[in-house]
Image (cartoon, grey):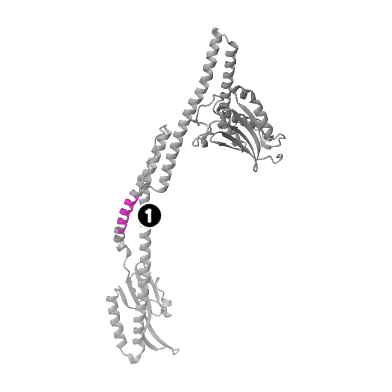
Amino acid sequence: MRRRLTIAIVAVVIGTLFLTTAGSLLLVHRAGTSTAGTETTHEAATVAQLLTQGSLAADVGVGARVRAARLLAALRVVGSYDFFQPVGLTPSGQFVSLPAPLTPAILNPAALQNGQTLSGNVGLVVFAAVPVALTVRQRNNLGIAQRDVAVLLAIRTVRDPVNGLSYFLLVAGGALLVAALVASGLARRISDPLVRAVTTTGQLAGGDLTARVPVSTHDYPELTELAEAINTMGDSLSRSQNMERQFLLSVSHELRTPLTSIIGYADAVADGTTEDVAGANAVIGAEARRLGRLLQDLLDLARLDSKKFSFDVRPVDCAEAARATAAAFRPEAQTLGLTLVTAVPAEGGLWVDADPDRLSQIVANLTENAFKHAESQVVVGAGVVGSSIAIWVLDDGPGIAAQDLPHVFERHFTSDRVASRRLGSGLGLAIVAELAAAMKAVVAAESPVADGRGTRMTIWLQPSPGGRVA
């Protein structure tokens, strides 16, 4: 990449130098011929005026002709003229002789006979043609005096700008050398961070999540941002891998515990080593149900990920949903020695647009989570809070550590807080967050609630436009 970038930059410089040199030579050529043409025309016109004055003015005598002859000789030397003298032009429009590279086709005899001055160039040869009346001949039969007409030709060769091409080439060589050095340094400064980034991403793709892109203070800000973004991605992947590993360990432990109990009691019943068959069957049934809940939670998460979780959204009374879900947990609360309190309006009327089954599942998961940590009481409530309708579940447990609070709804998160009762699968809060987001609701955790203890889990829903709010 570095070589291609260097070649590309040098090629651009070469193209620029070529166009600049060609354009400069063209402009110098045009400027040289234009300036030389103007000077030649002016000087030829001045000499022609002197020649005319010497021919027509009788009182001048030969003085004007002498001055003109001297001026012609001086201009040939000082002006570096190739040719500077009169050329005869017959009345029929024929030149007596023309110096190369001029030809009658280039000059216009008729225009010269009419007194017009002509100028131009043939390549690098600049010329000016000025008509001059040298003598007065006798009058013709019409009584009109006739003059012999000559043409003063001034020819000079303009310096070829190509002669200065060596200077341009010298300057271009120096510019190319500087451009090559700059291009090499620039290519290295751009390509090196990109090569490091490509190498690191390849390592990350190969499974080495510890790979990071080295960042240099000399890198361009955009390339530094790219390296930092890749490093942030690596940190996220590493963190996700660790959380997934912990999640799998947790799930495998959750699966192993009920399976161990089921296998142990089943073997005891089969071998006849237990006298409390009914109690063993009860334990087997409870652990089987626990295992079923874990598998159902895993299936729910898979369906949510694949967007195959079905929703039947319609107006639902949150008060009735909270009351019915809490009632289903009363036997379990009594078994655990907990008091389950329902705090919902007696008349109901807390209408929202939601899936009733999924809303009940959210409340059930929040209640089950509260059972795991409550010491004596769990409260399931619903009501109007501001412009929203809220359902909350409150427990009087030890609460959630401040550093853990933002992560309680993450799928692979595990907390190191005090030991809890082993109920459910440990995936309930992740499912709550997924279901709430799918129904455009917001779920939040608050801890501590009072006296440095307790946790409140709340789901916020928008009132149904077609329902009514008590």
**Dominant secondary structure, magenta:** helix
In terms of secondary structure, where does tag 1 sit? helix
Do we see residue 433 in this rendering? no
Whole-percent x, y for residue 89 in the image:
37, 78
291 over 431 or under it: above or below: above
**Residue farthest to the top?**
272
- Kindly give the residue lying farthest to the front in the view shown: 451
Which range of residues does the magenta coloring cover? 171-184
Q: Residue at x 39, y 43 (%)?
A: 194
Residue at 59%, 17% in the rendered image:
285
Q: Residue furthest bottom?
A: 59
- Residue 370 placement, left or right of 214: right
Measured as percent of width and height from the top left, residue 145 is found at: 41, 88
Tell me where residue 55 sits by quadrant. Answer: bottom left
Placement of the N terminus among the 4 image quadrants:
top left
Q: Toward which corner of the image does residue 44 lie, by quadrant?
A: bottom left
Drawn side of residue 434 relative to residue 203, left or right = right
Q: Which residue is mark 1?
A: 15
Observer-nearest of 311 and 148: 311
Camera-side residue: 340 or 210? 340
Residue positioned 47% across, 33% down in the render: 240
Q: Nearer the viewer, residue 146 or 188?
A: 188
**Residue at (40% x, 45% y) in the render:** 224
Q: Was residue 179 drawn as part of the magenta stretch in this picture?
A: yes
Q: Position of residue 204 (x, y in %)?
A: 42, 35
Q: Quadrant of the C terminus?
A: top right
